[in-house]
Image (cartoon, rainbow, N blue to C red):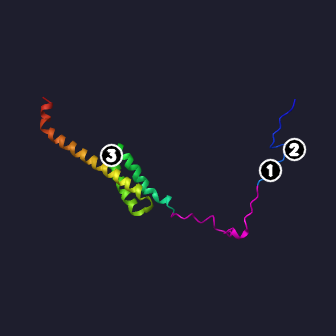
Amino acid sequence: MTTATDPMTDPAVPQAAAPQYAVPAAQLPPPSADSAAVPAPSGSAEEQRGFAISSLVLGLVSIVAGFTFVVPVAGLVLGILALKREPSARTMAIWGVALNAVMLAGALVAGLAAAAFGLFLLPFVPLAFV
């Protein structure tokens, strides 16, 4: 009966050495005492898309919750701010403004239609209690 040995731990099996890559000292940056205390620069393009992403998300949410008037207005304001502040996210900001503007206009038209229909039926209210 033979026992199975693990080739990774068996000293009889030759192991391939990991390649060693040396970096010349001239290419290494000089060590700094306060390098850990310096924050990363905050001007990257991915960090500058918050308003545009929020506007786009609120534009998509306003398709479902457009009747609240708050969601499309907030998305519209964020989209306009994103157009001014975030040139790298212009496409998302435009989509957010468009979606929110269409949903806000639709909610206003539906609200005005409901108010007009209610005013039209107002003379007939006394007949409902007879």
Is label 1 in a helix, a strand or a loop? loop
Separation of residues labelled 2 and 3 (CA atoms)? 73 Å
Q: Quadrant of residue 25?
A: bottom right
Q: Residue at x 28, y 50 (%)?
A: 105
* Front tag of 3 and 1: 1
Q: Which residue is mark 2?
A: 12
* Front tag of 2 and 3: 2
Give the amino acid type for the residue marked by disc 2 in the picture: Ala
Q: Residues within 10 Å of mark 3 (few under 14, many from 20)?
A: many
Of the numbered discs in the image, which one, if any, rests on residue 16?
Answer: 1
Percent position (x, y) of residue 57?
Answer: 41, 49
Give the amino acid type for the residue marked by disc 1 in the picture: Ala
Percent position (x, y) of residue 128?
Answer: 15, 31
Percent position (x, y) of residue 110?
Answer: 25, 44
How would you classify the magenta stretch by its main secondary structure? loop
Q: Quadrant of residue 50?
A: bottom left
Q: Residue at x 51, y 62 (%)?
A: 44
- The magenta segment: 19-43
**Mark 2 and 3 residues: CB-CB less than 8 Å, in contact?**
no
Is label 2 in a helix, a strand or a loop? loop
Q: Residues within 10 Å of mark 1 (few under 14, many from 20)?
A: few
In the image, residue 2 sits, relative to residue 55, either above or below, namely: above
Is residue 92 part of the magenta span, yes or no?
Answer: no
In the rendered view, does 65 fall on the left or right side of 49?
A: left
Q: Which residue is mark 3?
A: 66
Give the amino acid type for the residue marked by disc 3 in the picture: Gly
